[in-house]
Image (cartoon, rainbow, N blue to C red):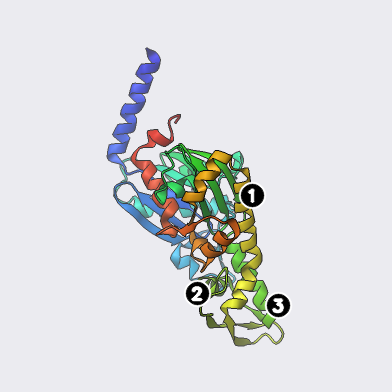
């Protein structure tokens, strides 16, 4: 009797709070943060970068404005990424970043703080989960629920994960790559590896320095990856001119880089991702493996946009591989779908 009364009161308060506030879903990525507001869709998409004053740690800029400062700040300001490998590397700055993003989308929802769903890597520890929850609560969330990134990505791209059949998702983010096989709204097998877009950028930086004695920054490396990066040979190879600092004489210099060179720079990172996918397939139960012969693999995340990655992965696994229609928004869209009916995904909450 008392338990039923307590549950009724809890549900009443939850519905009341839900009426006055808009719950939000957050894809808290190493490279970018996306915020989905229930009934409004994705309303914010900004880099996970914060600029702070070095002495006082006071916030100078957040998001896109802060990213423009990367590598260009004076000694009194530092632009940094508070997320590393998909988890919090700087708690204080991450909290400030979340407070900024939540406040930016919640200006018209001040009566009741929002409930927040945050997508996290499947391989993070309990300590790391607690850090994410505490950062969001301190940033102004009423309640915080966590969902594994591959689950959110699979939901976001529309995979029929409620069916008794295998669905495979590979979500390549900035800090991590998430590989998961799902069935009946659950994870059959998952693997999280801390290889993603950031490591690819660093591989490009190291390659350019080694081959050309040219020092370039993260933004230039990211531009090379996006514009001419590929996983297998292109029908027509591309090239691009970049500027950097000569490592020997220290003066500015311009060189032309080809897509075949960037492919060579990315080779090891892409091979690591492909090997994890193969490892997941080896762990998959036989009955589910047969489903994947027809259903194949779906790629999501920013890394899915690397040219011909689907072609290479299909050749290596023998399975059909497709890139989702909006890979950058997959995880955020997944949190939005979950917001529509929390009881389906958080029946024990």
User: How crowded is the residue under tag 3: few (<14 C-alpha within 10 Å), some, or many (20+)?
Assistant: few
**Which mark, by number, is residue 279?**
1
Q: Marks 3 and 2, Cα distance to the nearest angstrom?
A: 21 Å
Q: Which residue is drawn at 57% across and 61% down?
A: 315
Residue 335 vertical position relative to residue 7 in the rendered view, above or below: below
How packed mark 1 is, by other alpha carbons closer than 10 Å (few <14, some 14-19, many 20 or more), is few
**Residue 123 in picture, x, y percent from top left:** 60, 45
Alpha carbons under labels 1 and 2: distance apart: 30 Å
Location of residue 327 in the rendering, given as x and y in whole percent from the top left corner:
44, 58
Image vertical order of residue 264 relative to residue 163, above or below: below
The first of marks 1 and 3 along the sequence is: 3
Dividing the picture into quarters, in which one does residue 22 lie? top left
Q: Mark 2 points at which residue?
A: 227
- N-terminal-most mark, 3 or 2: 3
Res. 198 visible in picture: yes
Q: Which mark is residue 210?
A: 3
Q: Which of 26 and 185 is in front in this view?
A: 185
Q: Which of marks 1 and 2 is nearer the N terminus?
A: 2
**7 is higher (above) or lower (below) than 347:** above
């Amino acid at each position: 009797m008392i338990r039923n009364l307590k549950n009724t009161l809890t549900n009443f308060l939850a519905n009341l709070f839900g009426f006055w506030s808009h719950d939000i879903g957050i894809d808290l990525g190493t490279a970018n943060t996306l915020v989905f507001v229930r009934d409004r869709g994705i309303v914010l998409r900004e880099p996970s970068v914060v600029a702070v004053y070095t002495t006082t740690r006071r916030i100078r800029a957040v998001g896109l404005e802060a990213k423009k400062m990367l590598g260009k700040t004076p000694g009194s300001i530092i632009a940094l990424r508070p997320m590393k490998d998909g988890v919090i590397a700087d708690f204080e700055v991450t909290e400030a970043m979340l407070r900024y993003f939540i406040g930016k989308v919640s200006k018209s929802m001040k009566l009741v703080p929002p409930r927040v769903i945050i997508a996290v890597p499947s391989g993070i520890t309990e300590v790391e989960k607690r850090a994410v929850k505490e950062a969001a609560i301190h940033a102004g969330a009423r309640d915080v629920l966590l969902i594994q990134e591959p689950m959110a990505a699979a939901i976001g791209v529309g995979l029929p994960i409620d069916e008794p059949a295998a669905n495979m998702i590979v979500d390549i983010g900035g800090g991590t790559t998430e590989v998961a096989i799902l069935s009946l709204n659950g994870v059959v097998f998952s693997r999280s590896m801390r290889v993603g877009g950031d490591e690819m950028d660093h591989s490009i930086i190291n390659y350019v320095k080694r081959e050309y004695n040219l020092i370039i920054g993260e933004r230039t490396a990211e531009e090379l990856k996006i514009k001419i990066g590929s996983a297998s040979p292109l029908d027509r190879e591309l090239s691009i001119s970049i500027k950097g600092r000569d490592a020997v004489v220290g003066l500015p210099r311009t060189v032309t880089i080809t897509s075949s060179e960037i492919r060579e720079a990315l080779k090891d990172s892409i091979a690591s991702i492909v090997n994890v996918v193969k490892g997941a397939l080896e762990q998959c139960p036989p009955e589910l493996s047969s489903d994947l012969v027809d259903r194949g693999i779906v790629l999501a995340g920013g890394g899915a946009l690397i040219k011909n990655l689907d072609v290479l992965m299909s050749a290596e696994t023998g399975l059909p591989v497709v890139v989702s229609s909006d890979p950058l928004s997959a995880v955020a869209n997944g949190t939005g779908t979950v917001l529509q009916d929390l009881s389906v995904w958080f029946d024990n909450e």
